[in-house]
Amino acid sequence: MIHPTGARAGLAGALAVSLMTAIAVQPARAQSDTDHPPLAPARDVQVQYAVQPDGAPAPKTIEAWFTANGGMMRIDSPEAMGSTILNRTTRQVTIVLNKQKVYTQFDAHNGIRNPFLLDLSMQFTRKGKAQVAGVSCTEWGVVSGRGTATACVTDDGVILREDGVDGDGMKGRLEATRVTYGPLPTSTFQPPEGYQMVTRHRVAPSHAVGSGQPVTGGVAQSGQ
């Protein structure tokens, strides 16, 4: 999940709760280039995933977009309730809520924990080849400080399947159901036109994305 600090944490958490995996951006140690999978997509790509946290009765569908080298990411929650947009270069997080047509932005000064990206704080063991959603990938055993998982990663760095415990100790499974390569427009990683920026406003619990907790958002800013 995304772990911002301060008043905006509730809003980020409410949206990000729909995401199963979370793996730290910042490497804790180095490995050689031959004993780990690519750590970010090498090309612009859109992926549809079926995501099922441990204990959930059924998987849910989310959409994810990645720019080449993982600099920009967007994850849409189930049923298009909202989006999380991550800028790894500037460490900016944008949370969009579609029902309210609002968004908020904040800087993750302590780093961003990103879904669907691996990093060098983990240990990897190559296991073999597989195919997911019609795309070839390599199976890797993954060991983190919280447990173990398996991940099937393409040669150009797209995670197509992951099953087990992630870096935050959450257990579940995700699997790509559609993979589409191609240039992504800049607008993919921007709030929709006409949405208003909000700060420090409480949204009713029923409005929270995937969560029964109230959302910390904000008062609409005119002219946004």
Image (cartoon, rainbow, N blue to C red):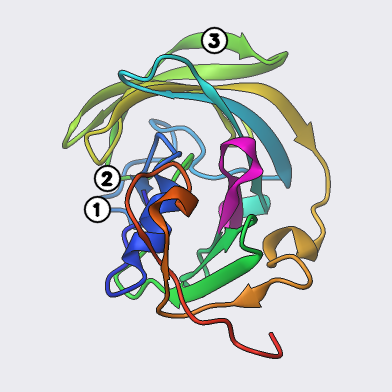
Q: Position of residue 136 (x, y in %)?
A: 65, 16
Q: Under tag 3, what secondary structure? A: strand
> Within the image, what quadrant is residue 11 found in?
bottom left
Number of numbered labels in the structure image: 3
Residue at point 47%, 9% (across, down): 128
Identify residue for label 2: 121
> Within the image, what quadrant is residue 145 found in?
top left
In the rendered view, tell whether residue 32 sits above or below residue 148. Answer: below
Q: Position of residue 102 (x, y in %)?
A: 61, 68
Q: Under tag 2, what secondary structure? A: loop
**Sequence-first tag of 1 and 2:** 1
Nearer-the-camera pick, 43 or 97: 97
Distance Cα–Cα, label 3 vs label 2: 23 Å
Span highlighted in magenta in the image? 70-84
Identify residue for label 1: 28
Residue 129: numbered disc: 3
Q: Quadrant of the C terminus?
A: bottom right
Q: Relative to residue 103, is residue 135 drawn left or right?
A: right
Name the kind of residue labelled 3 in the image. Answer: Lys
Residue at point 74%, 58% (across, down): 188
Contact between marks 1 and 2 (CB within 8 A): the answer is yes
**Sequence-first tag of 1 and 3:** 1
